[in-house]
Image: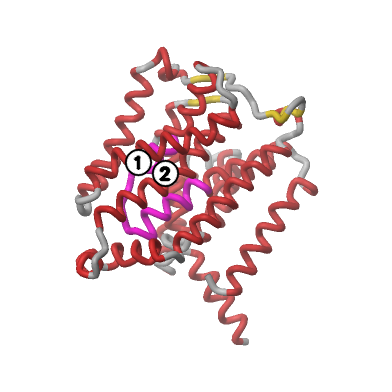
Amino acid sequence: MTRNQRLVALAALILLALVPAVVTDTYTRHIFIVAFIYGTVAVNWDLSLGLAGLFNFGHLAFFGIGVYTAAILTTALDISPWLAIPAGGVTAAIAALVIALPVAKLQGIYVVLVTFAFGQLCMQVVLSQGDLTGGAEGLVRLPYLSIGDYAFIRDFRFAYYYVALGLLTVSVISLLLLAHSPFGKSLRAVRDNPDYAAARGISVARQRVLVLVASAVFTGIAGGFYAIYLRVASPEVFGFSVATLILSMVLIGGAGSILGPVFAALALTFATEAMAGTRGLEEARFIIVAAAMITVLRIAPSGAINIFSRFLTSGRKT
């Protein structure tokens, strides 16, 4: 990250922290919360896809596993939501380890097929185990977060906003530190030239296993928070619509940039919600997002964050 990028990210964080003070509309706060959750999932997908170059198309399965972990723990075992949410990260990491073992030595389309099949398998398990997961109807009326007598559900999403923003912030900072660590540099080496990386003593298989597990932790936690926030767990979290939207955030924002998917998550979440409420655009919004993705990648293959960086650089020179 350049100095200008750090300043922009800090300014954006301060502005987002001040939003609830000026935005009292519950629906707008809700869109921000969903954008923060999607941003957390997107930036962690960027870790494996953008930074490590691993075509993991089962990333949303980790999110769904976090959703159902929190839902099952709170409904079937009566565990506190505060414990169920991080538990989603633990189960997602375990699932990532299981899928990473056969994927570690695969290449190209085979990685795509195996990870995609894993996501579909998770959805079929959810649908078939209706006694535990609620089947196609899902689990509803999950308990809400509270601290003592203070119930988060009664404050017009004020507290939920800051929990979601905090989760996104911690996730981004952790990934930025990881990306600039020796481990992050080794991931770039594996992405750019696996043979050269192996010749330099880097275990390609081990790095792929580690990056999949690392990308699943915050994704699973985000899934757990998503379930508790909406108070529902539905098989739709394994569906194509959510997966394609979040993948668009990664590619439009800039794969491998970490910060790019965060800004793209905010922009695309608000844009798709606006189109969903506009007559004639309800069904076309995903086509519009796809067209935007193609346009951005044609102009700047590194994503919109690259366009923004060039703008900052040119502004500094003038």
Q: Position of residue 187 (x, y in %)?
A: 34, 61
Q: Position of residue 267 (x, y in %)?
A: 57, 53
Verify whether residue 303 appears in magenta: no
Is residue 187 in view from this perspective?
yes
Callout 2 amino acid: Ala
**Who's the residue at 48% across and 52% down the image?**
43
Give whichever of 129, 213 is nearer the camera: 213
- Per the picture, the main secondary structure of the magenta-coloured stretch is helix
Separation of residues labelled 2 and 1 (CA atoms): 6 Å
Q: Which residues are magenta?
A: 40-64
Mark 2: give few (<14), some (14-19) or many (20+) Cα within 10 Å.
Answer: many
Is residue 240 in view from this perspective?
no
**Mark seen at residue 216:** 2
Horizontal arrangement in the rendering, residue 156 relative to residue 109 (left or right): right
Q: In the rendered structure, are the residues bearing label 2 and label 1 in contact, judged by CB atoms less than 8 Å apart?
A: yes
Quadrant the C terminus occupies? bottom right
Verify whether residue 54 appears in magenta: yes
Quadrant housing residue 243: top left
- Residue at numbered disc 1: 96
Horizontal arrangement in the rendering, residue 260 relative to residue 277 (left or right): left
